[in-house]
Amino acid sequence: MVLAAGEGTRLRPLTERLPKALCPVGNVPLLDRALARLAGLGMTGPGRVAVNACYLGGQVVEHVGDRAHLSVEPGDPLGTAGGVANLRDWIAGRGVLVGNADAYLADPARPPGPDIAALLRDWDGDSVRLLGQPAADPAAPGTFDGHVFTGFSLLPWRLVRELPVAFGDLVRALWRPAEAAGALTVMPYPGIFYDTGTPADYLAANLHAAGGAGLVDPTATVTGRCRESVIGAGAVVRGDVTRTVVWPGATVGPGERLIDMIRAGADLTVEGASSMGHDVDERRSVP
């Protein structure tokens, strides 16, 4: 199951136009990256894969089409636990691999899939497993056995069937109780991870996907200077962009200079540099 129902509040105002799951990273929507990762494990189609939707859900439904089973939550999003519970009839006795659509995982040594295969390997069908990386502070709040969660978990049916179809999160509903009972295992993830929840992490994930050299869609028009940036399909760049993401169809005018920014449309520019390691006076959009 891929979780794609959230509002993406930390990524506003970008997510006022597009659900976070459809925000492009390296010119590929995050949701498509998650579906490709599952396909790398042989999980495809509506019998094996589900996607939930709520906020701007029509866009998610249209984008997914018949590639997965769709669970549209009415009203407000049900949260991670409620979203899983809402799919109980579809899960129907199976263990469920749950992934966050906004998790950017990249292991250059492996194709999509094998990095999360560790969650499935030799699983007893009864315990809870999380994919994680060692935390800088192993005792920090939000860590599990000294690890930071990296977007995927494996849940047994015996726990899923007890979840109420109401707002709730997996941390308090399942993960912490399993941890307290000694029934939670963290499987190490060796690659790159960003949760893309903030503009800074979203920009960092894009720059990583670009491989340091930049990534320009063949249908984009670039007549200005473009350095280490990601330029989407149909975008038009007449100005100067550096370490910047230009969304599909967006424009950068001939007098503009964007550094460490995200541009959507012709009028929305979001600062993405707070954790990028550049001097504050370098981060600017100059009309």
Image (cartoon, grey):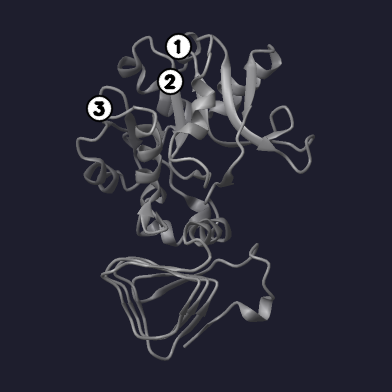
What whole-number distance in Å separates the C-alpha atoms at marks 1 and 3? 19 Å
Q: Amino acid at mark 3?
A: Pro
Q: Which sits earlier in the primary sequence, circle 2 or circle 3?
A: 3
10 Å crowding of disc 1: few (<14), some (14-19), many (20+): some
**Taking 31 as reference, is 116 left or right?**
right
Q: From where the camera sits, is residue 167 visible?
A: no
Residue 200: which numbered mark, if any?
A: none
Helix, strand, or loop for circle 2? strand
Figure quadrant of the N terminus: top left
What whole-number distance in Å separates the C-alpha atoms at marks 2 and 1? 7 Å
Q: Amino acid at mark 1?
A: Trp
The image shows residue 48, relative to residue 148, as above or below, that is above
Q: Which residue is mark 2?
A: 96
| Residue 140 percent location from the top left of the image | 77, 38
Q: Nearer the viewer, residue 60 or 260?
A: 260
| Residue 215 percent location from the top left of the image | 41, 66
| Residue 249 percent location from the top left of the image | 29, 69
Helix, strand, or loop for circle 1? helix
Helix, strand, or loop for circle 3? loop
Q: Which residue is mark 3?
A: 46
Q: Residue at x 64, y 20 (%)?
A: 185
Q: Which sits earlier in the primary sequence, circle 2 or circle 1?
A: 2
Q: Amino acid at mark 2?
A: Val
Q: Which residue is mark 1?
A: 157
